[in-house]
């Protein structure tokens, strides 16, 4: 890994996935085609991109039963425990509707309503991601969403990974379709003969999925446009080099474009971690992917002191931030920008990926400066409630009408004045 000192402000900035003009054109064409031809287009794209001709997009109960037969009881037990941890954490995010009554009799409030329907995209490709199922579905269930639809690209045999199907069943998904890519996003957004449209789409995917989500946003809501995974580790001389290196590689193995960064005031730790990364890379099963990630987006920054290290981390605004320092909790208040913060030696990033309970769908590409992890609020909407009293309107009606006329909206003013006139 590259080691360098921080003098001026250091920031790794990779723009949110914009894609090439060719990729954008492909995605727009797919969406328009699925929108106009429905299942026929969806079937053709599935055959073209996933290399399988399906007789049905729907996952059957028989396929789910078959999936349970392919995984062991220990896996099922772990999934259930992880789902419970995620559920317990997200239940603490629930907020009630509320009403308040003013002295003049006016009642103001906020009504919180779950979304009617949500589509969850679960990626396929080089790995199966049952954890993504839990992290998207469980908070939606906690929020009260009635209809949750899952889509995921089929393999060459027209199947979904057994682990993904088991996680979906355990999380309570009853509507599952074998469809992936931009075509699946289009089906969720606009509907086909088989797949009824949803109100929001969540879940990660490749560049075509990301571009498709961006394209349909506005017709439906989306969670975020997520880029490749990131980790920053803020560490001092008390951290173990082998553990820091292992955590850096835990993200590097995701994607050649994943970003793994160590920020430390300790040159000794920096040199030891650089050596350890190369040592561990040599025996990593996904070493080709991880090695490219480390070569292109891995770095070690050596700062003058811990305060400079903290400020560097805040400028990076990483998706995942590990704090492995003496008295790590004392730094928590100084950290302003990070998707998820892991404090202490035993809080390795995979703990959050799979089991602890907080959501692992996190803001990337520096967007932790202004956005949050996927949470219960993402699956609910808020309506303001206004029950204005006669006393309040008589006291404030003239002010409201004056405000409206200041904006040149005479009908607004007259709508209020009509009630004042009729009550005289």
Image: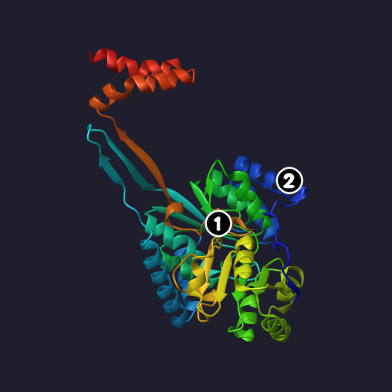
Depth check: give the residue in front, 381 or 275: 275
Residue 122 in sight here: yes
Q: Would you place residue 117 above or below residue 235 in this image?
A: above
Q: Earlier in the sequence, mark 1 or mark 2?
A: 2
When asked about the image quadrant of residue 349, the answer is: bottom right
Callout 2 environment at 10 Å: few (<14), some (14 to 19), or many (20+)?
few
Quadrant where the N terminus lies? bottom right
Depth check: give the residue in front, 125 or 278: 278
Q: Which dot, 1 or 2, sits closer to the camera?
A: 2
Quadrant where the C terminus lies? top left
Q: Where's residue 366, x and y in %? A: 62, 58
Q: Where's residue 313, x and y in %? A: 61, 66
Question: Which numbered circle lies on residue 57?
Answer: 1
Disc 1 from disc 2: Cα separation:
26 Å
Q: Where's residue 197, x and y in %? A: 50, 46
- Which residue is drawn at the image coordinates 22% and 35% (left, top)? 103
- Which residue is drawn at the image coordinates 37% and 23% (left, top)? 400
Depth check: give the residue in front, 39 or 265: 265
Question: Image check: 257 left or right of 58?
Answer: right
Callout 1 environment at 10 Å: few (<14), some (14 to 19), or many (20+)?
many
Q: Would you place residue 114 above or below residue 290 in this image?
A: above
């Amino acid at each position: 890994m590259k080691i360098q000192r921080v003098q001026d402000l250091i920031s790794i900035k990779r723009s949110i996935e914009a894609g090439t003009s060719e990729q954008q054109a492909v995605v727009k064409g797919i969406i328009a085609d699925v929108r106009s031809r429905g299942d026929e287009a969806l079937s053709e794209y599935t055959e073209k991109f996933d290399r399988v001709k399906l007789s049905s997009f729907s996952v059957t109960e028989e396929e789910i039963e078959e999936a349970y037969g392919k995984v062991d009881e220990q896996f099922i037990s772990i999934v259930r425990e992880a789902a419970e941890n995620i559920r317990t954490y997200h239940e603490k995010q629930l907020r009630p509707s509320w009403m308040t009554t003013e002295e003049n009799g006016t009642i103001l409030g906020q009504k919180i309503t779950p979304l009617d329907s949500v589509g969850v995209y679960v990626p396929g490709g080089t790995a199966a991601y049952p954890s993504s199922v839990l992290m998207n579905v469980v908070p939606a269930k906690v929020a009260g969403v009635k209809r949750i639809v899952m889509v995921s690209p089929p393999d060459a045999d027209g199947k979904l990974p057994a682990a993904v199907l088991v996680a979906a069943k355990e999380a309570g998904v009853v509507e599952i379709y074998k469809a992936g890519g931009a075509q699946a996003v289009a089906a969720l957004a606009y509907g086909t003969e088989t797949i009824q449209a949803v109100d929001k789409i969540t879940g990660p995917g490749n560049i075509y999925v990301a571009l498709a989500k961006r394209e349909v946003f506005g017709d439906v809501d989306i969670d975020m446009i997520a880029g490749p995974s990131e980790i920053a580790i803020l560490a001092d001389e008390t951290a173990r080099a082998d553990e820091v290196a292992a955590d850096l590689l835990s993200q590097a193995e995701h994607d050649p474009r994943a970003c793994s960064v160590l920020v430390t005031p300790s040159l000794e730790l920096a040199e030891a971690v650089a050596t350890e990364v190369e040592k561990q890379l040599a025996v990593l099963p996904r070493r080709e992917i991880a090695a490219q990630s480390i070569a292109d987006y891995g770095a070690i920054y050596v700062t003058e002191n811990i305060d400079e290290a903290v400020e560097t981390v805040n400028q990076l605004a990483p998706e995942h931030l590990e704090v492995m320092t003496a008295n790590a909790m004392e730094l928590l208040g100084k950290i302003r920008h990070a998707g998820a913060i892991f404090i202490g030696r035993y809080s390795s990033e995979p703990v959050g990926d799979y089991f602890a309970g907080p959501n692992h769908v996190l803001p990337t590409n520096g967007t932790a400066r202004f956005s949050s992890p996927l949470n219960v609020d993402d699956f609910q909407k808020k309506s303001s409630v206004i029950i204005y009293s006669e006393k309040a309107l008589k006291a404030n009606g003239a002010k409201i009408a004056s405000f409206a006329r200041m904006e040149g909206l005479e009908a607004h003013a007259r709508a209020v004045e009509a009630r004042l006139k009729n009550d005289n």
